[in-house]
Image (cartoon, rainbow, N blue to C red):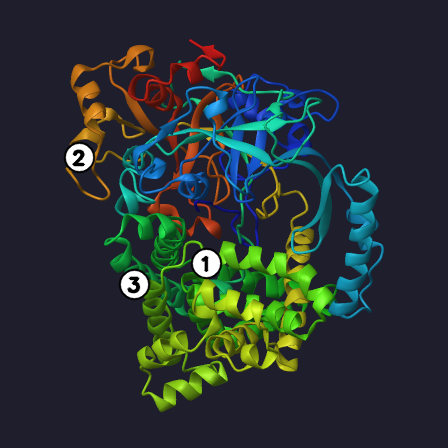
Amino acid sequence: MKKLILFLTMSFMVLPVRADEGMWFLMFIERLNHRDMQKMGLQLTPQEIYSINNHSLKDAIVQFNGGCTAELISKDGLVLTNHHCGYDAIAELSTPEANYLKNGFWAKDRRAELKPKDLYVRFFVRMDDVSKRILSKVNDKMTEAEREKAIQQEIALIEKENNEGGKYTVSVRSFFQGNEYYYFVYQDFKDVRLVGTPPESIGKFGGDTDNWEWPRHTGDFSMFRIYADANGNPAEYSPNNVPLKPKHYLPVSLKGVKEGDFAMILGYPGRTNRWMPSGGIEQNVKFAYPAWVESSKLGMDKMKVHMDKSDQVRLNYASQYASVANYWKNRQGMIDALTKHKTAATKAKSEAEFNKWGNKPENKERYGNVIATLNNYYSKTNEKARHDNYLVGMLRTSTFAALPYSLGRGLEAYAGAGAAERANMRQELEEAINESYKTIYEPLEKDVLAAQLNLYATKSAGYDIAPLVAKIAKENNNDFTSYVNNSFANSIFASKQKLTEFLNNPNADVVKNDPLYQLSTDLLTKYRAKSEEQAKLDADYSKAFRLLVEGMRKANPNAKYYPDANSTLRLTYGKVRPLPADKRNDAKVNYYTTLAGTVKKYKPNDEEFDLPKKLIELNDKKDFGQYADKAGYMPVNFLTDNDITGGNSGSPVLNGKGELIGLAFDGNIEAMAGDVIFDKELQRTINVDIRYVLWVIDKFSGAKHIVDEMTIIR
């Protein structure tokens, strides 16, 4: 998903948390949230939301391929998520001749559903608090390294105790910066097949221009199906597998939404930093994020030149480009929002208040140096943060910044092995090579690598860059074009064919002296390097941050806290809520958009705002079927004030009865600071109206058999 999000203000005198703020653990809903939710319109019991022994809402929510959320919506394992969450799988299954990404796809029956190579969903089984057990293994006399070792040893025991011989995946996670620990039990299903997707002109309508913007008119959804063995257990792909019979699936409501309606979202938010100190915010705004934005934009521009010339290249790089573009706009929005709201200054004031409390006689020994330690860390790592983000930008956009290093180590081992051992190693190496090179386009890769090396060498001047890059830059006046061209001409990593020839005649010296391998090794070594000074800074910071959060909670013990997001299942609740009137939106109230508004944005043959002819015709005829709003319009997207972030993409939006009313897919640019600060006035979640999803499936795509699978509430 994407990245939206919002926040627990870190002000020293913590205020009561608003109903629409917070990402809550399901196991604490009854104690912390249920009464508030009832007042707002919830009609379910806590046990109907989360139960270990009986089916509940949690059983219908899955983590989708490790990065998004999805939900089950039929008794036969039908799964709904965002189009951008299914993007990788759809692109993988597409060819220029059968371009499902561009033209859409709907399986006419179960046999026609398509299996991507690697796709899985993860069910949440249960969780429990193991804070006392883990923290009993550590003490204040330990160094941070000793503390971490003791914690990891206990985590390993807990995970082994609860995985039931490998049946489940168990993950112990840290919360509140290491002040609490919980374990989570999951079950993974790996046979997941594509059922359908709208064309890109619907699923990605508005493209980068509308990304993070409102009003929005995007049909951001795709559908998959989970398969299991005959007994309902996870299984590798087999034509004999059958659709999963889930413990619970969501009924789908056609009743629509209106302003003030209760809205609840369950999902897997990826990462928030709402306890982040002021120095961290300042570092991101002035050093880290500008470098991220600049390197991302450079990589995108170089990729797009080649993608625009070839449908095959566009398909091959579509997913990578989309991911980079999403975060590029996100980071720029963060810079703008955090600067505009002076978030760092606000947090610095609260830290000054904490510092007074921390230096009271009874607190001084434990908390007196916390703020000074944090400030020292950031002042000494600002230039490193800038450097690291230019380097990471290169690794994210240039395949050959990292690939030769990752393959080269295996090739060196292969060359040094005996004949029998080589025979065993060869198949694995060939599979890695085939997978790595199946979508590579050399002219694009050369352009991206040369440009990123120039940016890295010229803009990371405040911190020592990778030594080989520095040498090449000095010898070539920062122009890496000739160096990159010559490296590709003389490298075994330039093509699959050259690597195959190497496997037939292995020589370790060839790898060690290879120019692309040397460059990639130089970059990755620099990326992973940590001096003794940096290791001490990191250890001091980790302890100080943990004590900051501990002290703030100790000073305000009656406040209602929730932990930062970290890809564990959470619940957030709020209401359908408009933004101030906007002349760009044709809706009567600015909390929804319409199909008529979509057509008004139509630009024939435009990459972002083109529309299928059939969609325009259906709108002209007002052929909306049972999916139209009572007022006569065809709804597309709507707003709620739920608190979500990246990873919540694809999360179900539910009404008070637990019925599906929409699909979360984005946030609004005005509240882009939400990873660190919750804006109670501006924060919104942008959702696809479920009625638009069903209309696209039924009336536009002619796949009513998919709608017929669902339990429809009229």
Locate residue 86: give its quadrant. Answer: top left
Where is residue 321 drawn, in percent x and y?
Answer: 36, 53
So how many labels did they put on this image? 3
Secondary element at tag 1: helix
Question: Residue at coordinates 48% horizontally, 72% vertically from top-left?
Answer: 492
Secondary structure, mark 3, is helix
Three-letter amino acid code at the position of disc 2: Tyr
Residue positioned 82% across, 40% down in the render = 165
Disc 1 to disc 2, C-alpha distance: 37 Å
Which of label 3 and label 2 is nearer to you? 3
Q: Residues within 10 Å of mark 3 (few under 14, many from 20)?
A: some
Q: Cα distance, mark 3 to mark 2? A: 27 Å
Badge 3 is on which residue? 302
Q: Position of residue 461 (x, y in %)?
A: 40, 82
The kind of residue tagged 1 is: Tyr
Q: Is residue 653 left or right of residue 550?
A: left
CB atoms at circles 3 and 2 under 8 Å apart? no
Q: Nearest the camera: 407 or 610?
A: 407
From this viewpoint, is residue 282 visible? no
Tell me, yes or no, if residue 196 can be seen here: yes
> In which quadrant of the rendered image does the N terminus lie?
top left
In which quadrant of the rendered view does residue 495 lie? bottom left
